[in-house]
Structure formats: C-alpha cells, structure tokens
Amino acid sequence: MERENAVKKSLIDKFNLLDEKISIPRERRIFAEVSYSVFMDVCGFAAGELGFNSLCAITGLDIGENLQFIYHLADKNGIVLNLKLEVPKANPVIKSVTPIFNGAIFYEKELKDLFGAVVEGLSEDGRRYPLPDGWPEGQYPLRKSWNQKEMLHGKEEVE
C-alpha cells in the first residue's frame, strides 16, 4: 500500500486539515472527509497533481440532517480516492466539478433531481435527468423523507 500511503501523505501535506480525516481501509481504496470550503481545491489537486483524473461516479446518501456526496476518483493504477462531502439538507449547495471532470454533468443532474442538491455552476439546459420532465418540483425520491403515496395522493402517476 505504498502508493495509497503516498497519496494520503500528499493530501495531508497540502491540506493539513485533512489529518485524521483520511483512511485507507484496504488496498486500492482511500477515503477522505473533505469540508465544503476546500472541496474544489482538493478535487483539483487530486486530479492535477496526484493523477486521479477519472471521475467514476458520485454517490448520494441521505444521512439525517445532512446529505453526503461521495466523489469516486480513480487513477491509472486502479486506486480509488473517495472524497466525502457533507452539506446540510436544509441548504444542500455544492459546486459543480465539471471544470475539473467534464463528464460530471449527468452525475450532478442526478444529485439535483434525486436529492434536491443545488449544484452551483451546473449548466442548465432545461431537461431533467434522470426523472421525467413532468416530475413534481420539490419531490426528491432518494431522500428518506420522500413519500411516494403522499406525492401521488389525488394525482395521476408520473409516466
């Protein structure tokens, strides 16, 4: 796990506030809890300096009062750096990573549609993804509080 430890050291050297926030649970997997204030800087550093230039996915989780988004970044050796970002559910604002990872647009649209994230800098083309265009505003099906029966009460199902 030489490469994983070198990545951890580089991240802590550059962003000392990540000390105690990075773990290596097993070979080829690194997890880092990153605050909103430095998230974009950490993403840029990981992609530009450490070679994590492939965004594999963004996972969204409803963890109670907060939403957590995990950005899965990979390098050419198959090591995955998982950057965890938490934002308050009451104000779920995140910044778009499309300036760093062009392909992030569909992942970010999913976060917007399914979790209600406000993605600053996300190109607005008027189309929904992955929910249909007729989906009711304010209905986020991957939040724990979402109630399909309540949404559909007295309405036809969304096609």
Image (cartoon, grey):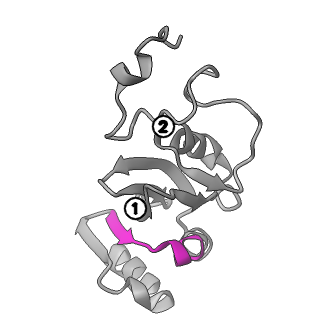
Which amino acid type corresponds to the residue marked 2 in the rendered image? Leu
Q: In the rendered image of this protein, does residue 115 appear above or below residue 151?
A: below
Please tell me which residue is depicted at 59% across the width and 52% down the height of the picture: 118
Q: Position of residue 122 (x, y in %)?
A: 69, 50
In this view, the residue in front, 74 or 12, is 12
Residue 63: x and y in percent read 30, 53
Q: Residues within 10 Å of mark 1 (few under 14, many from 20)?
A: many
Q: Residues within 10 Å of mark 2 (few under 14, many from 20)?
A: some
Q: Is residue 146 above or below residue 6?
A: above
> Badge 1 is on which residue?
82
Residue kind at label 1, given as amino acid type: Asn
Q: Give above or below for 27 relative to 155.
A: below
- Mark 1: secondary structure: strand
In this rendering, the answer to whether 23 lies above or below 14 is: above
The nearer-to-camera label among 2 and 1 is: 2
Q: Verify CB contact (< 8 Å) between mark 2 and mark 1.
A: no
